[in-house]
Image (cartoon, helix red, strand yellow):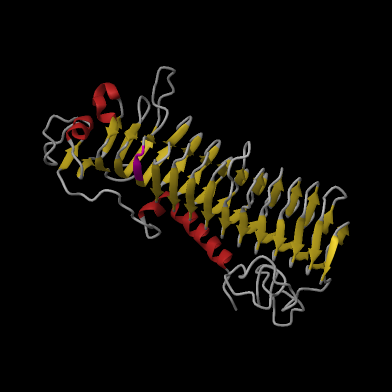
Amino acid sequence: MKIKKWIGGILVVLLIAILGTYFLNGELLQGRIRLVTPSGTTWYVDTIGGGDGTSITSPMLPGAAILDAENGDKIIFSAGTYLVDDDIWGLGVYVTGKDLILQGAGIGLTIMDCSLDGFVFYNATVDVIGMTFIKTMEDGDAEGETAVYALGGANVNLDRIEVKDFPLQAIYVDGEGTELIVENSYFQNNYQAIHIFNGANGYINNNKFTKNVDLAIFIVEGTESTIKNNIFFKNRVGVEVRDSEALVDGNVFEKNEWGAYAYSYDGGISNNQILNNKFLSSSVVGMSLSGSPEDSTLSANLFSKNAIGINVWDGASSIITNNVVTDQIGNGIISTGASPTIAYNTIANSGGNGITLDEGDTSYVVNNILYKNIYGLLVDAMAGAVEVGYNDAYGNTTDISGTYVDLGGNRYDDPAFVSVISFDLSSISPLINQGALYFVDDDFEGNSRTNPDIGAYEF
């Protein structure tokens, strides 16, 4: 019996739920990327200062240390709450043209209160490690709107940090050549946790985003970013990608309004890879794609108990393959004004239809299992040229309805699943070797499709 990837993912979610925030300091730590190799002086700072900063017993103020530091230096922040303020720190709030390590005592120990100012990194390479960033003051005169603002070709690595309660963008990354790495960190109750903009790039790995009011991650205008192995829980939107190219891989989206949303605005690039994610209990939609002039690919994702599993609309020409879409409250997949290719998916137990196609251009629906939905496949009269073949529709109120080009090979057989939890095929399934080789070479788990079965899994 094959062990399903999505079951393993659910176990990870349960483990993190037990460990809470502290998973960031535990065995689930990944990566430990460092941009700066310590090669110079180690400076020691605290909230009081007064020393020369050369030893832990003679700490100086942070601003002075940042100004004095040279490339390769490390600045160690003792435990305590620091008011980040350019009136106190001087130009030390702004790191320009230096390669530095800013090392805190750990999450919840070294606390940066950015009510007045945040860190600005310009054309600098900086590792920021082991700190909490907060904003406690809501003052109309306060300048601090971000915890970290990176621009001008800066390269910034944030590792084991916590960021919470920022009313706008907590982390803002701007401009071509500017790059952000975030790992093992926690973002809560911000308006937007991370905003990557205007040609900047991001590598966001193994973090947790909880209850951010608007967007956990917003990537916009020409960036090429990677978002991997993160948890998005109870945000309005987990990830939004606009006019950009992004890899969204191996994440868990649970109880957000929108799990993820990728789209083109006014004809920009929107070619995204949405792979190996879990979209769970989204109140609006698990994954939405719209207005894409190029193909985006959704493959090997699990969609469970969302209001709608996948929504494709407004010109999106997406490739939707090898997904398991089960127990949606409404439709499993709905396409309006778009031209998707929907192949090798298992779509089951939808409260609405398995697949609905409405007002589109040419679409392909091939090699899918449509199991116990209202309509298995509903093709609206306005759907355009829809080619349908080699699907298995079984146990739906109505299996396949509408006007379409019949490619042949459609079946109406009980799939004979091993179970309706795993949805893999048993040895007696009539769907084994009954598909046609369209669009993809591997199944949900990476098994080769040479003489393909129907549905997300090869036997």
Secondary structure that dominates the magenta span: strand
- Residue in the picture at 85% in, 47% down: 382
Q: Which residue is found at the position 30% from the left and 51% from the top?
A: 34
Residue 96 appears in which quarter of the rendering? Answer: top left
Q: Does the magenta stretch include residue 376?
A: no
Q: Quick one: 41 or 319, which is closer to the camera?
A: 319
Q: Picture coordinates of residue 278 (x, y %)?
A: 58, 57
**Residue lying furthest top:** 141
Which image quarter is the C terminus in? bottom right
In percent of width and height, residue 436 lies at 73, 72
Q: Can residue 284 be seen in this view?
A: yes
Q: Residue at x 60, y 62 (%)?
A: 300
Left or right: 152 as drawn, with respect to 104: right
| x 57%, y 70%: residue | 446
Horizontal side, residue 307 vs residue 238: left or right: right
Q: Which of 437 and 459 is in front in this view?
A: 437
Q: What stretch is highlighted in magenta?
A: 153-157
Q: State the quadrant of the N terminus.
A: bottom right
Nearer to the camera, 364 or 119: 364
Percent x, y for residue 179? Answer: 39, 44
**Which image quadrant is residue 268 in?**
top right
Residue 177, given in percent of the width and then of the height, sits at 39, 41
> Is residue 350 in view?
no
Quadrant of res 66? top left
